[in-house]
Each structure stands twice: as C-alpha cells, then as structure tokens.
Image (cartoon, helix red, strand yellow):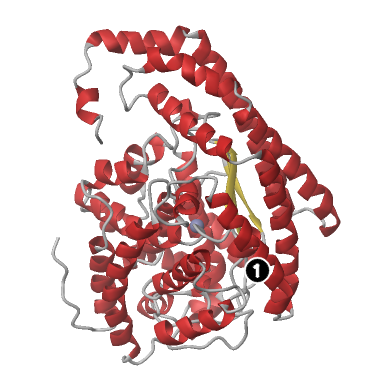
Amino acid sequence: MPNQARADDRCMLSTIAMQTLEKTHPKLTELKKRLAEIDDINCAASLLYWDQATYMPLGGATARGRQLATLRQLAHAKLTDGAIAQLLEDLSTDAADLPYDSDTAALLRITRRQVERATKVPNSFMAELSKHRAETYQVWAKARESNSFALVQPYLEKTLELSREWANFFPGYDHIADPLIDASDHGMKAATIQAIFAELRSQLVPVVQAITEQPPIADHCLKQFFPEADQLAFSLKLIQQMGFSLDRGRQDKTLHPFMTNFSINDVRITTRVQEQNFSECLFSTLHEMGHAFYELGNAPALENTPLAGGISSGVHESQSRLWENMVGRSRPFWRYAYPQLQAAFPAQLQSVPLETFYRAINKVSPSLIRTDADEVTYNLHVMIRFDLELALLEGSLSIRELPDAWNERYRSDLGLVPDSDSNGVLQDVHWYSGCIGGAFQGYTLGNLMSAQFFEAALKAHPNIPQQLEQGDFESLSHWLQTNLYQHGRKFTAEEIMVRVTGQPLGTKPLMRYIHKKFGELYDLPLTAIAA
Ligand code: ZN
C-alpha cells in the first residue's frame, strides 16, 4: 500500500477537487460512458455463454461460437481504438491528486492496466486464438469420451505455441509463464507461486501420509440414491437461507458448474447432480454461491464499470472455497442444516447420525480427479498441473510426453496411476479451452486466501461458529461484504490481503485450519502451528 499514507493525509481541498472532478469533468463522464458500453457488450456475451451452457440445443453451437467471437472482438476493439487511451491521458493531470482509495482513482488505474494489456495483443491474434480454442474444445470432448489423447495432441501442440506467442507480446518477463499468470492473478509470478507452493507441499505431504495410514472413513451414507429433483430443491432452499435471493439470482443445471453475472443484481449459478452421490450437487451449489456472493456484494457505484467483479481468480476462488469448505463442511453449519437434510431425505439419512455424516463429507482419500478431491489432497492436484504447465512453456517437456509425465506425478505425489487418460491428463477442460499457463494456480491461491480471510473474520467475530449453528450468517456475510466484496476490483490481491488480514498471503492459516480440523477427525498428533 505505498500510497496509503499519502491518501490519509489528503487535505479538504483535494477532497473538494475530487468531488468536483467526479461530478463535472466531461472527459470522465465520456470515459465512463464508453466503459459502460464495453461492459454491456461483455455482459451480453456472458448471457449468450450462460444460455449455451444451460438451455441451448446442441445445434446452436456453431452460430453461438460466431456470435460470442463477434461480441468479444467488438469489446476488444472499443477498448483499444485509442479513444479510451486518449481520455485516460487527458484525465491524468487532473486526477493525479485523487486519493488512491477513491473510486475514480481506482477506475483510471484499472482501466489503464486493461487498455495497456489489451493493446499489446493484436486483434488478429485474439481472433486466431479464439477460433483455435473453440476447435480444440470440440476435439477434447471427443478425445475424453474415447480416451484418446492422440486425437487432441496436435491441437494442444498448437495451443502451446499460441500460449508462448501470447506471452511474448509482454516482453521483459522473468519466466515465460509470468504474463499468462498475471492475466488471471495480477501481480503474481511463477517464482513467487513456486516458493509458496513448495512451502505448502512440504507441510501437506506428511499430513496426507499420516491420514492414509489411518483406517478410512466410511462414506456410504452419501452414496445412496438421492432423486435429482429433491437434491436441487434442497440445495436451493439451503442457499436461500444463507442469503442467496431469487430476486437477484437463479440456479440452473449444467455439465461443468460455473457462476456468471450480467449485473450486480442478476447472478446466475449452475450445478450438476449425481443421483448416486449426494456431495456433487450440494457442494458445487455452495461453491458457486460463494462466487455469487462476491459479485452481489459489490458496491452499487461500481456497477457497469471495470471495477465491478472480483480481483483475481485466486481471490474469487477464496470466496467459493470459504463458503463451500470453511462454512459448508463445518460441524457448526451441519448442526444447523442436518435436521433439515434428514427431513428432506428421511429414507436415506434418518438413521445416520450427524457425526457419521460430518465425517463422510470430510473424508480424505488420495484420488485421481481434482474436482472430487478432499480439502487436504486438493492442492497436490493443482501443484501437479502448475509444474507441468511451467515445464511445457519452458520447453523441458513436450506435449507428446505430457500423458506419461502426468501419470508419473500422480504416482509419486498421490500414490495412484490413472487407469486412463480420460481420468488423467484429459480430465480438466482448462488447457483444451484456453491457454497453457495461468490456468490452475488460482485454485490453490484461493484455498490459501480462504483460510486467511476466514481466520481474520473469526478474529473479528469469535462467535461466528455459534452463529452458524443457529443458521445465522449475518456477521460473516457482513464482514466479507464490508472488507472485501464492496471493493470489487479496486485493489490488487496483495493489497487486499494486507488491508483485510494484516498479513501478506502465507501458508500458515490454511495449515492451521487443516491441522485443527483433520487432526481431530483422524485423531492425529499434528503439531499446532503458531500464529
Ligand atoms: Zn470456483
């Protein structure tokens, strides 16, 4: 926060100057108008994407791909046509004295970054990348279904080439992955993430080892038949009790759950259901609800500007994981919600004690699939992908060698070898619908941040667990809203961690959480980690 002290010393005069600038400067009004148009185009694209992923018949795919590409290119062209850059330039002198924290200073700062970034990548390259991504996605879907990596290999080779090309539009990086990482987690670099991941890994591996030496937790209470309609109804009812309002959002079914929004008053979450596995629908609903809360909590003044939304993929993920895991897999929460769940599924759960259910939803077991992984092993899945991305971009690993490298890492890190590429290197959509580089680190950064935010919330309101037991989510929601959600994208991830938790991002809060929760669950003598 280099500008914080300066900002705090503002005299009355500059406050008046700021208010005048914000109210009357015609160039600021013009800038906001142009940015609002771009936001409208992007929201229209998001709506088309939401429709594609929920209700669109398959036959619509080709036209929808074209329509999305048109809108994205239009938004990119409007951002980079020089007019916005000129307005930013014209405003720079008058805005120089604005406090760092003010909405206008943040708007100019974030817009400048967006324009600089977008201008470096030619529109023709974006069009080629967009076309290649759409084609690769279609081939990947077939490759995964038929367990044939060979089918998608040439496409992925092209993706790697394009990813390197994209990174090279941003010369001066320390590592070729840095520009790709920066696109989703601004301010982060490969070296910083490697250091934090290495520290986390060295602490996680002994915990996983100690747990796998214990008798496994029984989780068959979750693997009964739970009718789809009842699961959807229960999860929707539960998130409404937690504060998700159908006046400002809705939930629909999809193949790969996601959240999107078209304004701060219209948020769409999606889920999927397995009738033989109760966890899937409920926890993906809680996860997407966490993403939705972040967007719904933006200050109304940020609406229709580049400041609306979440800071980075890591900070966004911290909210989904906080609500899914820190709250949704906690004992206090289920003391409140379990009687309702038993009432909704009496045949399946009436005779299952709360403690049996709580242990089942927190079972730790090394597995092949990232999205099914428990809280302890999840980050090991992410680290495998992150390391492989770096090796591919560096050129020390080829796409042809990728499936074997993947399997070897699963053997060494999780003690399991995938039975097929579909359950191995083909499982995640990310590389096959985007770039290689920057795709995965946000998941683990998000887990680390979720524990650090939750610890800070508990410090401010030590009775949050007792409130959760009563179904009272107000203190926690209000704390997150005030400290994080309302600011939208005004600050960087680094700034918000220090502002909100008093500390830069670290591994200790997550490891404290894991030691406490899983030490108790598995009766392990895990040493407490000092504050
Ligand atoms: Zn998420």
Where 202 falls versus 469 (above or below)?
A: below
Q: How many marks?
A: 1
Q: Residue at x 71, y 45 (%)?
A: 127
Q: Quadrant of residue 54?
A: bottom right
Q: Quadrant of residue 271?
A: bottom right
- Specify the amino acid type for callout 1: Glu
Where is mark 1, residue-wise?
Answer: 228
Decide which of 481, 41 is in the foreground and name it. 41
The single residue placed furthest to the right in the displayed view is 59
Q: Residue at x 75, y 54 (%)?
A: 55
Q: Quadrant of residue 4?
A: top left
Q: Residue at x 59, y 26 (%)?
A: 36
Q: Residue at x 46, y 81 (%)?
A: 409
Decide which of 65, 528 is in the foreground and name it. 65
Decide which of 144, 531 is in the foreground and name it. 144
The single residue placed furthest to the left in the displayed view is 530
Residue 260 placement (x, y as % from top left): 59, 47
